[in-house]
């Protein structure tokens, strides 16, 4: 006997994952109405589909701006997609604006860990090595590496937890959001560059 899937359940899953209505309904049917299992399945599918799309050229998109704190902080952000049609959708534009707002609040310095300059990472590592001088030698390298990765992740936009999720939601990173929107819109979505301006900085 198939489980009755309510419109409310489909809507909740759609809000959680950004996936299409029919994909949500199908995932819920396959999961027997279990929203957690359906969410996990859609996330897996989204990651797989996003990986397939990652090689496709994303040359369309928009540049968005966000001004915060009575004009004291400003962000310019470019996000790319594959078609002008998707660039004009409300869903894509809302994603871009949310990312710009997040940048204003969390002040990342890089988009991803692979964009961190080697000399910057080396300088940070030297600081953590100095701090770990009293740690037993066997554990020192692991301690330094752990602190370094944590520090770099905190500075990289895609690794940061989305500022609007708050305590009541399971935290998602900006990369999670990017994968969700790519899955929902069926296009390769890339955050290309941003500039953060702070008054007097």
Image (cartoon, helix red, strand yellow):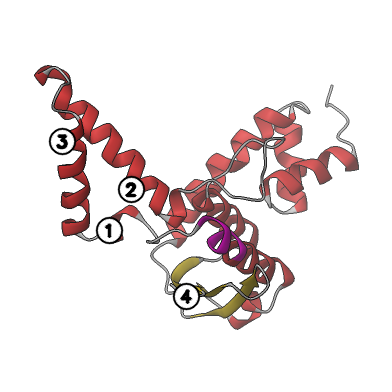
Circles 1 and 2, Cβ within 8 Å, touching? The answer is yes
Instruction: Tell which circle, 3 or 4, labels the residue nearer the N-terminal end.
Output: 3
Looking at the image, is 73 positioned above or below residue 108? below
- The answer, for residue 81, to whether it is visible in the render is no
Instruction: Tell which circle, 2 or 4, labels the residue nearer the N-terminal end.
Output: 2
Residue under label 2, please give it.
152
Rendered residue at 39%/53% (across/down): 155
In the structure shown, which secondary structural element does the residue marked by tag 3 occupy?
helix
Range drawn in magenta? 101-106
Residue 36 at x, y = what percent?
68, 29
Residue under label 1, please give it.
116
In the structure shown, which secondary structural element does the residue marked by tag 4 occupy?
loop
Looking at the image, is 97 positioned above or below residue 102? below
Q: CA distance from mark 3 to mark 1?
A: 19 Å
Residue under label 3, please give it.
129
Q: Looking at the image, which is closer to me, 132 or 178? A: 132
Q: Residues within 10 Å of mark 2 (few under 14, many from 20)?
A: many
Circles 3 and 4, Cβ within 8 Å, touching? The answer is no
Instruction: Tell which circle, 3 or 1, labels the residue nearer the N-terminal end.
Output: 1
Q: Looking at the image, which is closer to me, 147 or 52? A: 147
Determine which quarter of the picture holds residue 118. bottom left
Q: CA distance from mark 1 to mark 2?
A: 8 Å
Residue under label 4, please give it.
200
Q: CA distance from mark 4 to mark 1?
A: 25 Å
């Amino acid at each position: 006997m198939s489980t009755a899937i309510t419109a409310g359940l489909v809507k909740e899953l759609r809000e959680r994952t950004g996936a299409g209505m029919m994909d949500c309904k199908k995932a819920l049917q396959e999961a027997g109405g279990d929203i957690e299992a359906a969410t996990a399945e859609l996330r897996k599918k989204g990651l797989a589909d996003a990986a397939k799309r990652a090689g496709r050229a994303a040359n369309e998109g928009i540049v968005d701006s966000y001004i915060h704190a009575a004009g004291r902080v400003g962000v310019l952000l470019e996000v790319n997609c594959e078609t002008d049609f998707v660039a004009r959708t409300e869903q894509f534009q809302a994603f871009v604006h949310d990312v710009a707002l997040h940048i204003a609040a969390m002040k990342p310095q890089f988009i991803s860990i692979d964009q961190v300059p080697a000399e910057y990472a080396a300088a940070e590592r030297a600081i953590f090595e100095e701090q770990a001088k009293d740690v037993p030698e066997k554990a020192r390298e692991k301690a330094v590496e752990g602190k370094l990765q944590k520090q770099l992740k905190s500075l990289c936009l895609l690794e940061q937890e989305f500022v609007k999720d708050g305590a009541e939601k399971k935290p998602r990173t900006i990369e999670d959001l990017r994968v969700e929107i790519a899955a929902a819109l069926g296009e390769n979505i890339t955050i290309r560059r941003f500039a953060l301006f702070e008054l007097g900085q």
